[in-house]
Image (tube, rainbow, N blue to C red):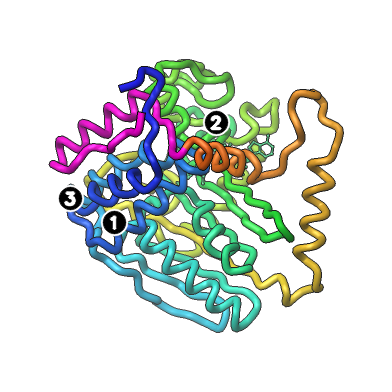
Amino acid sequence: MASKGCLIPLPEIRRFINDSMISAGSPESHAAMMAEVLSAADYRGHFSHGLNRLEMYVKDVMTKSTDAHATPVIVSEKASIALVDGRNGLGPVVGNFCMDLAMKKAAETGVGWVSARGTNHYGIAGWYSLRAMAKGFVGLSFTNSSPLLSPTRSKAAALGTNPITLAAPAKGDSFVLDMATSTVAVGKIEMQQRKREPLPPGWAQDKEGHITTDADKAMEASCLMPLGGAEETSGYKGTGLALMVEIFCGVLSGSKYGPFIRSWKNTSEEANLGQCFIALDHSAFDSGFEDRLSHLLSTIRAMEPANPEKEVLVPGDPEKWHMKIVDEQGGIIYHKNQIDSSMQLAQKLKIAPMKAVN
Ligand SMILES: NC(=O)c1ccc[n+]([C@@H]2O[C@H](COP(=O)([O-])OP(=O)(O)OC[C@H]3O[C@@H](n4cnc5c(N)ncnc54)[C@H](O)[C@@H]3O)[C@@H](O)[C@H]2O)c1
C-alpha cells in the first residue's frame, strides 16, 4: 500500500459501497442508490460525505434504526406540492423519490415542492439538485440533521449543519451551490481527525464554548460554528440560514427539528429527519435563462483576481476541477487511514476489500 494513499477507480468504489450495504441488510436497488450518492461525493471532492460516511449508514441498517427495505409514500398532495413520509427508509431512497416527484409536478405546473418527514441522512444535498438539473430544471434541496451547530451566543449545539443547495443549468455551464450552514460540514472535522491535522480557527467550539483548532476537542464537544463564525464576523447570518432550512424541513413536514433530533450517530432511536426538494421550470419565466446565467458566470470568472495566482471561481467550479483530476488519474486517491478503515469494514462485513490500482 502506498504511504500517500491509494488510487481506487470509481466502479470499484461503487462496488465496495454496494456490497457493504447489501451485507448490512439493504436490498440491491437501495444499496445501489447509496453507492451512487457516496461515490459522487468523493468524485466531487466532498470526502466528508463519501466513504467516510459509509460506516454510519451500515450501522444504521444493522442496528435497524433505519429500515433499509422501506419505500416512501405520499401522505397528501396538491398540484405543485406534496408531503411524503419516508417511513424511516434510507435517505437517498427517499431523496430520489421526492426529487423525481418534484420534477413531475414542475413539468406539469412550473414548480414542484416536496416536503419529506420520517427520513434519514441523505449524503450530499447537492446530489438531489443535480438530479433535477440533469433534466433541465433548477433544483434546490435542504435537509435538517442532528444538532451539531451552535447558534450565535450559545455554548451548546441546537441545530444541524443544515445544508442548502441550488443547481441551475447554464448554456455549456452550470451553477452548483452545495453548502453546509455551519462554517464546514462535520465530516471535514472528522477528516482532519483522521489525518491528525489541526482545524483552521472558526470551524468549531470546545466544551467551554471557546473557538478550538483541536479536531479531537471539536469532535468531543460536537459544537460547530455557524457560517460566518463568531458574532463579530456575522455568524448570526449562518444561524439564520440554518433556522431557515429547519423551517423548510422539520417545521414544514412535521418531522423532528432542531435540538429534538437524535444526537449525532445515535442509533437508539429513529432519526425522523425532514427534507425539502424543489424543482423549478425556468422556461415558465422569461426565455433565455441558460444564456443569461452562462453570461453572468463567465463575467464573474473573468474578474481580475485579487491574488494573480488564484482565479475567481463560482460555486460548482472546485467540484468540476476535482472531477477532472479524478478522470485524468483514473480514480480517487484516498488517505491511507480511510483505506485502513475500509479494510476493517470489509473484514467485519465479510466482503472483498477495495482493490487499489497502485
Ligand atoms: N446531509 C447532511 O446532513 C449534510 C450536512 C452538511 C453538509 N452536507 C454536505 O457536505 C458537503 C460539504 O459542505 P461544505 O459546506 O463543507 O462545502 P464547501 O465549503 O467545500 O463548499 C461549499 C460551496 O462553495 C463552493 N466553493 C468552494 N470554494 C469556492 C470558491 N473559492 N469560490 C466560489 N465557490 C466556492 C463550492 O462549489 C460549494 O458549492 C456538501 O455536499 C453538503 O451538502 C450534508
Q: Say which of 26 and 240 sits in front.
A: 26
The numbered mark, 3 or 2, whose residue comes first in the sequence reads 3
Disc 3 target residue: 23
Residue at 74% in and 60% down: 171
Find numbered disc 2 in the image and state the secondary structure of the residue it sits on. loop
C-alpha span from label 3 to label 1: 10 Å
Find numbered disc 3 in the image and state the secondary structure of the residue it sits on. helix
Residue 114 lies within the magenta run: no
Residue at 62% in and 38% down: 318
Q: Amino acid at mark 3?
A: Ser
Q: Amino acid at mark 2?
A: Met
Do the residues bearing badges 3 and 1 touch, measured as CB atoms within 8 Å? no
Mark identifier at residue 225: 2
Residue at 32% in and 33% down: 356
Residue at 41% in and 30% down: 222
Disc 1 target residue: 31
Q: Position of residue 316 (x, y in %)?
A: 63, 46
| Mark 1 burial class by Cα count in 10 Å: few <14, some 14-19, many 20+ | many
